[in-house]
Amino acid sequence: MTIDVNQLAEHLAHTPFQVEGVYRYARNPGVPHADYTDAFPGFVFPLAGKVQFEFNGTPYIFSPGKVVHGGAKMKLAQKMFGKTDWEYILVLYRICNSERTESSFSQQHFELSTGQSPRLIELIRRLWHVYNQRGGISMFQTEMLFRDVLNEALLCVDNRQNSCESQPLFERVAHYIHEYYDQSLTIASLAEQHNVNRNRLSYLFRRHAGMGPAKYVLEYRLNMAQEMLATSDLPIQQIAQTVGIADPFYFSRAFKKQCGISPTEYRAKFINNPC
């Protein structure tokens, strides 16, 4: 089953818990699986390959990009996929407040879709390494690292969900810019046109394009200007106006900043090297 990541985060924020064990399992050299889960709930962090486990009859495929949670003492079954190697880290934990145990997420099985996250994998491997050290510092680091692992996993899930929801809106705004780049476009007008506030619009473009909407508009206009310089003999000032930049001096500065040469130099270079 899937789960509301915000509700899970709120639960973890208000529920005291402690790491009971961190274990690595792999097909090679391989370990036998039990018929029931441990006496403590746990998170499974797949690192490589693919294997299926059932928690109380519900199947979950352990593969990178997912995190699976199983409750305590659940009926367990395993299914192999040929001779494919697999590896995962299991972190068992104990709820310290018995009053919250029965009604908590710890009694459920569910899956989190994190996507591929090198940082999450790195944190998980560090957690396993630190747990296998000795001493009080190691114990303290284990507790801190497990929370870092959960934090990263929750952020990955949240980012993927936001990405899925925001991608269509970003594509609509970007398509609008591509169609009307020659007109007066501002962040305020784009936000109003697509019924979204300016902060949300800026977030969309920084997330999906790696830049703010204003820079996106400018770069698209300059890209169109490059095409016009190479395929027409229109005056540079007219090209600037055609792509929606009224000030020719600003156009020349912005063009040189993006392309490394002036519009005049760009046109001369293309004429001399048409291929």
Image: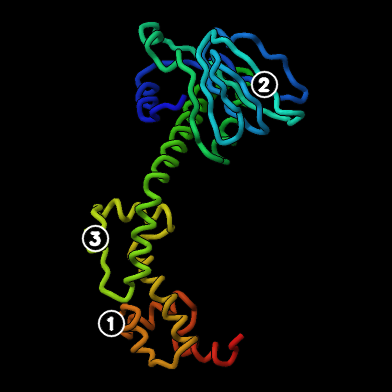
Whether the residues at callouts 2 and 1 have beta carbons within 8 Å, the answer is: no
Counting residues from the start of the chain, the first of labels 1 and 3 encountered is: 3
Marks 1, 3: nearer the viewer = 3
> Which amino acid type corresponds to the residue marked 3 in the rendered image?
Gln
Residue at x-position 60% and y-position 13%: 76
Q: CA distance from mark 1 to mark 3?
A: 22 Å
Q: Where does label 2 land, which residue?
A: 79
Q: Could you tell me which secondary element the residue under label 1 belongs to?
A: loop
Relative to 47, say whether 238 is above or below.
below
Q: Could you tell me which secondary element the residue under label 2 belongs to?
A: strand
Q: Pinpoint residue 175: horizontal percent, then vertical percent.
A: 37, 63
Marks 2, 1: nearer the viewer = 2
Q: Where residue 193 is drawn, which disc sits there? A: 3
> Which amino acid type corresponds to the residue marked 2 in the rendered image?
Lys
Residue at x-position 63% and y-position 18%: 134
Counting residues from the start of the chain, the first of labels 3 and 2 encountered is: 2
Q: CA distance from mark 2 to mark 1?
A: 66 Å
Q: Residues within 10 Å of mark 1 (few under 14, many from 20)?
A: some
**In the orientation shown, which residue stands out farthest toward the front?**
57
Is 234 on the left or on the right of 145, as rendered?
Answer: left
Q: Where residue 246 is drawn, which disc sits there? A: 1
Quarter residue 60 falls in:
top right
Q: Pinpoint residue 215: horizontal percent, then vertical percent.
A: 37, 66
